[in-house]
Image (cartoon, grey):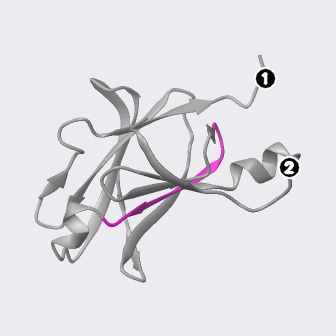
Amino acid sequence: MSRCCSENRTKGRAGRTAESHKRRTVEVEGGVAISPLPLTHGERVTVKYDGLLAKSGAEQIYLRRGYGSAQSWNSVQDLPMQRNDGVWEVGFEADDESRLNFCFRDHVENWDNNNGRNWSLEIHTGEIP
């Protein structure tokens, strides 16, 4: 995962449950925010974006996602994002147990791939070792 810049967590007592701990949004570099983290297989994830393409005035932005290693993505899809208060967002189910990789493109094929690194999240199975 990219370096974390700041975290917005739900408020609660120090002894909060694991479920409330997961209801946080983590902002990462490049104008990307992800919720919830850690990401568990079968769980719904929301990605918000106000990075380079959004700041350039794109009319439509797509999240390109795939699973697997950074060099070999499987099940690649382009998901249209919706603009909400100036921030683009999309939600989807983490339906693979490998690694989630994603980047962004606009309607005229301009790309934001995090300076060639894309964004990447480990997906957990939900099992406690």
Q: Is residue 29 left or right of residue 19?
A: left
Disc 2 element: loop
- The C terminus lies in which quarter of the figure? top right
Residue 93 lies within the magenta run? no
As drawn, which residue projects farthest toward the bottom? 85
Q: Quadrant of residue 35?
A: bottom right
Q: In this view, does 47 lie above or below 85?
A: above
Residue 17 placement (x, y as % from top left) = 86, 47
Q: Residue 120 carries which label?
A: none
- The N terminus lies in which quarter of the figure? top left
Magenta span covers which residues?
A: 40-50
As drawn, which residue projects farthest toward the front? 14
Residue at x 57% of width, y 40% of height: 95
Residue 46 placement (x, y as % from top left) = 53, 58
Q: Is the magenta stretch mostly helix, strand or loop?
A: strand
3D distance between C-alphas at marks 1 and 2: 18 Å
Judging by the rendered image, the residue that carries numbered circle 2 is 16
Label 2 sits on what residue type? Arg
Q: Residue 128 carries which label?
A: 1
Residue 16 placement (x, y as % from top left) = 86, 49
Disc 1 element: loop
**Number of marks in the rendered image:** 2
The label nearer to you, 1 versus 2, is 2
Residue 49 lies within the magenta run? yes
Residue at x 38% of width, y 67% of height: 81
Label 1 sits on what residue type? Ile
Q: In which quarter of the image is residue 23?
A: bottom right
First in sequence: mark 1 or mark 2?
Answer: 2
Residue 91 placement (x, y as % from top left) = 52, 60
Q: Is residue 57 above or below residue 48?
A: below
